């Protein structure tokens, strides 16, 4: 373990001074690190504010990460000595990933998902560190303290960690298959899927009793990933999960918003065996899933449903079809759709008001787009048509109010 590490550091030190990069002699470790960076989706958060994610630009930081408490700006993790992690050791890198503590002892905020990365063994964080050290150092100083008082005091994270965080590497379950354990590692470790898909308590920590039950996220709704048939992945086959993660869409759904980024920078570049392992784990979770509330559909003669149906036929049916079945891999099906029936309507309102473009994936390069309706439908009409698709064709989900639509319109005004 130690020898390759020293070699990595030596190579990294050399590379940090040499402008022309020769193949490092720890090539295998660096390649493993490159793949782990893909698994951990580091680029989606650490890329430059310009959206450039090529080479070092994927790691220069500056992107604000939205949390319920305010925005937290990502730091520069290129090997620049003054503004990046160029002076860090592999030990201090492991400590940051494993415990959320910087070399100077300051606590990191869990907007950096170290509560998931803590599952990575030392050899994995060493490989990431070796890879990051092969990047061109780029000088980019970012403002690290954008949170309001008292959260701007990093010591407040001490209490948070004591309450909600337990560092610890992943331990495989000997009663499960190697594939399942690989999936468990990917989902609970580098992939940090629960960071978005598990609802949060008031302190912003995962509600473990509601694991993967889905929740609002940055003006979207991260879907239920439990085995629930109506709102979760119960009806999805393992193949369908793999296809979605690889291509950003399948016959049931299309990834938008934050999930489109996860697909673009992370899951579309995962190996097929790793995607299968994730699907195996999601289809057989380690603990009983929280039960989703039972729902009955609104009656078809409900006034909101009648208005909504008329708007749907007029504005939406041409693409999604009158029966809500859509056109496979082109126009997502809305009948029986999990996305459409989530507890929270954030994603639907957003898609209808703002339109949406499908995730980019090299496996599915042409992205169909959905036009924006925000300028054609008022709040009542927007609420009616979303309520309709949530309760037509056998769907059942809470109705949406004009106030919900107005709130989303406000939210979108502040965001591009
Ligand atoms: C969901 C967004 C997100 C993802 C994904 C993410 N990070 Fe970060 N990372 C952050 C934020 C935000 C901070 C700053 C936290 C703070 O200032 O307290 C941070 C901080 C760090 C730090 C501490 C740097 C310093 O100077 O304090 C390191 C190291 C780091 N990330 C590495 C990584 C690596 C490696 C990956 C991929 C395996 C990764 N991050 C993935 C958001 C993310
Ligand atoms: C940055 C936040 C984020 C992360 C991390 C994330 N997801 Fe998602 N995911 C979302 C959002 C938001 C949606 C809903 C997207 C939509 O409605 O188009 C979603 C949707 C999905 C869906 C589609 C569900 C459906 O019913 O349509 C699957 C499957 C999924 N995610 C799996 C995963 C897995 C597996 C991981 C970890 C490797 C993961 N997600 C990590 C935010 C995230
Ligand atoms: C021009 C064709 C078109 C029209 C008209 C249209 N849509 Fe869409 N819609 C799409 C496409 C394409 C997507 C998928 C975008 C993507 O891949 O994320 C989509 C996605 C959606 C989604 C997200 C589904 C999911 O699984 O993530 C919903 C909900 C939706 N549309 C509802 C509507 C409603 C309601 C209307 C009418 C107000 C409408 N659409 C009109 C093409 C259309």
Image (cartoon, grey):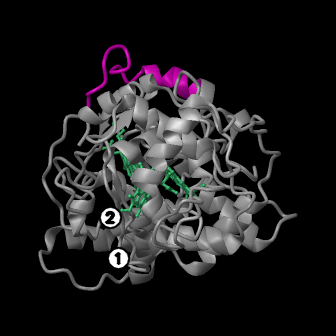
Q: Could you tell me which residue is drawn at 74 percent across and 61 percent down?
A: 235
Q: Is residue 201 visible?
A: yes
> How many neighbours does mark 2 have within 10 angstroms: few (below 14), some (14-19), or many (20 or more)?
many
Q: Quadrant of residue 43?
A: bottom left
The label shown at residue 366 is 1
Residue 201, image x, y percentages: 59, 26
Secondary structure category for the residue under label 2? helix
Residue 3 falls left or right of residue 358: right
Is 157 magenta? The answer is yes
Residue 6, image x, y percentages: 40, 69
Label 1 vs label 2, nearer the camera: 1
Residue 337 falls left or right of residue 8: right
Q: Nearer the viewer, residue 100 or 248?
A: 248
Residue 225 falls left or right of residue 350: right
Q: Quadrant of ligand 3?
A: bottom left
- Secondary structure mainly formed by the magenta segment: loop
Q: Is residue 1 visible?
A: no
- Provide the residue designation for mark 2: 132
Residue 395 falls left or right of residue 128: right
Q: Nearer the viewer, residue 373 or 362?
A: 373
The magenta span reads 144-162
């Amino acid at each position: 373990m130690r020898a390759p590490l020293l070699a990595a550091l030596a190579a990294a030190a050399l590379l940090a001074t040499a402008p022309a990069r020769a193949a490092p002699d720890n090539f295998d470790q660096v390649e493993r690190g490159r793949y782990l960076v893909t698994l951990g989706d580091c680029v989606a958060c650490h890329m430059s504010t310009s959206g450039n994610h090529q080479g070092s630009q994927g790691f220069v930081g500056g992107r604000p990460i939205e949390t319920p408490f305010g925005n937290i700006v990502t730091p520069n993790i290129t090997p620049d000595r003054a503004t990046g992690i160029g002076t860090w050791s592999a030990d201090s890198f492991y400590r940051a990933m494993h415990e959320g503590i910087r070399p100077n002892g300051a606590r990191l905020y869990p907007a950096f998902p170290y509560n998931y990365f803590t599952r990575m063994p030392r050899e994995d964080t060493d490989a990431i560190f070796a890879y990051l050290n092969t990047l061109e150092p780029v000088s980019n100083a970012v403002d690290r303290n954008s949170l309001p008082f008292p959260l701007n005091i990093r010591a407040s994270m001490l209490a948070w960690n004591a309450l909600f965080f337990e560092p610890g590497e992943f331990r495989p379950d000997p009663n499960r298959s190697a594939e399942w354990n690989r999936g468990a590692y990917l989902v609970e470790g580098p992939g940090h899927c629960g960071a978005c898909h598990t609802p949060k308590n008031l302190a912003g920590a995962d509600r473990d009793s509601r694991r993967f039950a889905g929740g609002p996220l940055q003006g979207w709704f991260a879907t239920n990933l439990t085995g629930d048939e109506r709102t979760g992945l119960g009806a999805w086959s393992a193949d369908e999960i793999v296809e979605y993660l690889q291509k950003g869409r399948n016959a049931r759904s299309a990834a938008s918003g934050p999930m489109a980024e996860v697909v673009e920078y992370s899951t579309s570049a995962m190996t097929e065996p790793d995607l299968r392992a994730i699907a195996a784990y999601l289809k057989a979770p380690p603990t009983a899933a929280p039960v989703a509330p039972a729902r009955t559909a609104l009656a078809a003669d409900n006034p909101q449903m009648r208005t909504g149906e008329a708007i749907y036929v007029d504005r939406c049916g041409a693409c999604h079809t009158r029966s809500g079945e859509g056109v496979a891999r082109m126009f997502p099906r809305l009948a029986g759709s999990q996305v459409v029936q989530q507890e929270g309507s954030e994603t639907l309102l957003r898609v209808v008001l703002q339109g949406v473009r499908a995730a980019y994936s090299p496996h599915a390069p042409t992205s169909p787009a959905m036009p924006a309706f925000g300028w054609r439908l008022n709040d009542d009409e927007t609420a009616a048509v979303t309520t309709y698709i949530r309760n037509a064709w056998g769907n059942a989900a809470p109705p949406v109010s004009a106030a919900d639509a107005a709130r989303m319109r406000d939210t979108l005004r502040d965001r591009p």
